[in-house]
Amino acid sequence: MLEIGWFSARLFFKGKLLRDPMNFVRQTAIGIGISALLLFLIAQAEVSLWIPVVLSSLFTGILMPFLHKDIKLK
């Protein structure tokens, strides 16, 4: 299992894993931006810090598979 992960990581950093790396970067940036905005908006409420972090992380974890569903590998 670790060998497969290591092989994939090497291909990713060499630039040979993804067909369209800019699409991957764009989709990831969209997810991070939405997560940061949600974190900022929820943090404006007078609640302890862990609540906005948990909610933002949960939403981002649900959102990322939908954003990355069309990513093509070589």
Image (cartoon, rainbow, N blue to C red):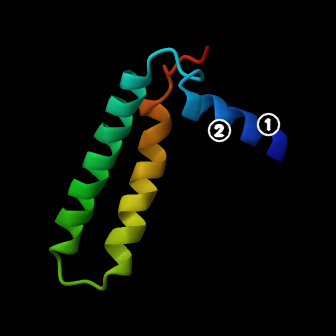
Q: What label does residue 44 carry, if any?
A: none
Q: Nearer the viewer, residue 19 or 30?
A: 19
Spot the residue most to the front: 14
Quadrant showing the C terminus: top right
Q: Is residue 65 above or below residue 46?
A: above
Sequence-first tag of 1 and 2: 1
Q: Amino acid at mark 2?
A: Ala
Number of numbered discs: 2
Q: CA distance from mark 1 to mark 2?
A: 9 Å
Dot 1 surroundings within 10 Å: few (below 14), some, or many (20 or more)?
A: few
Residue at horizontal 44%, vertical 23%?
21
Quadrant of the rendered image containing residue 72: top right
Residue at horizontal 42%, vertical 68%?
54
What percent of the width, then of the height, locates residue 8?
69, 33
Q: Nearer the viewer, residue 14 or 18?
A: 14
Q: Which residue is mark 2?
A: 9
Q: Secondary structure at mark 1?
A: helix
Residue at horizontal 33%, vertical 48%?
32
- The answer to the question of whether label 1 and label 2 lie on touching residues, with beta carbons closer than 8 A, is no
Q: Amino acid at mark 1?
A: Ile
Dot 2 surroundings within 10 Å: few (below 14), some, or many (20 or more)?
A: few
Q: Which residue is mark 1?
A: 4
In the rendered image, is residue 62 in sight? yes
Quadrant of the rendered image containing residue 18: top right
Residue 12 lies left or right of residue 39; in this view the side is right
